[in-house]
Image (cartoon, grey):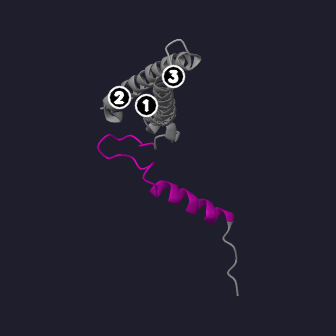
Amino acid sequence: MTAPPPSSAASQAAVESADDASPQSRPDSAEGEVRRREPSRPPETATDIASLRCLANASARSAVNAHLVIQIVAAAYTKLTLAVVATFSSALCAFSAPSVASPVYAMAVASGAAGVFWVAQYWRLTGELRTLLARSSSREPAAVHDSA
């Protein structure tokens, strides 16, 4: 069998006694003041937003640099392949030409010029790659933002 519900006066007294026992409303014996609980703050104020932003920027910069390295290396291999093929075909045409005035020799000169162009493009790309790798290795995520 169930017990009868407590009267409203008894439940009111129980609530008041529970409120009196709570640590927030007990008077401090040394100061005589009532300690109040600090209002809750959103979690964003407890964390350092600048540090999180710095970490996200470093991560994004690292991903972009990794993508650039992949693209530059692929383009450099293409330029190097074109330079080797152009140089080889230039040498083959030059040695098989009957004379300097023949069209085969003119083709050898044009192919040699194309080979020089592709070698120059290869050196330009490898220079960009060296610069990118040196710049990305000099940045350390811990040294970018010091939140001490």
Q: State the CA–CA distance, disc 2 to disc 3.
A: 61 Å
Three-letter code for the amino acid on which mark 2 is drawn: Val
Disc with the residue nearer the chain's start (2 vs 3): 3
Task: State the mark number for residue 8.
Answer: none
Tell me, yes or no, whether the two marked residues, 2 and 1, touch with CB atoms within 8 Å: yes
Res 41 visible: no
Q: Quarter of the image holding residue 110?
A: top right
Classify mark 1: residues with Cα within 10 Å, few (<14), some (14-19) or many (20+). Answer: some
Residue at 44 percent of width and 19 percent of height: 120
Which residue is the site of mark 1? Answer: 54
Name the foreground residue: 141 vs 122.
Answer: 122
Classify mark 3: residues with Cα within 10 Å, few (<14), some (14-19) or many (20+). Answer: some
Name the foreground residue: 85 vs 136.
Answer: 85
Residue 95 x/y as whole percent:
46, 25
Q: Which secondary structure lies at badge 1?
A: helix
Classify mark 2: residues with Cα within 10 Å, few (<14), some (14-19) or many (20+). Answer: few
Disc with the residue nearer the chain's start (1 vs 3): 1
Q: Which secondary structure lies at badge 2?
A: helix
Q: Which residues are magenta?
A: 8-36
- In magenta stretch: residue 99: no
Which residue is the site of mark 2? Answer: 144
Residue at 68 percent of width and 68 percent of height: 7
Q: State the CA–CA distance, disc 2 to disc 1.
A: 7 Å
Name the foreground residue: 12 vs 99.
Answer: 99
Residue at 38 percent of width and 40 percent of height: 33
Residue 96 x/y as whole percent:
50, 27
* Number of the front mark, 2 or 3: 3
Which residue is the site of mark 3? Answer: 97
Three-letter code for the amino acid on which mark 3 is drawn: Ala
Q: Extreme bottom residue here?
A: 1
Residue 58 x/y as whole percent:
43, 33
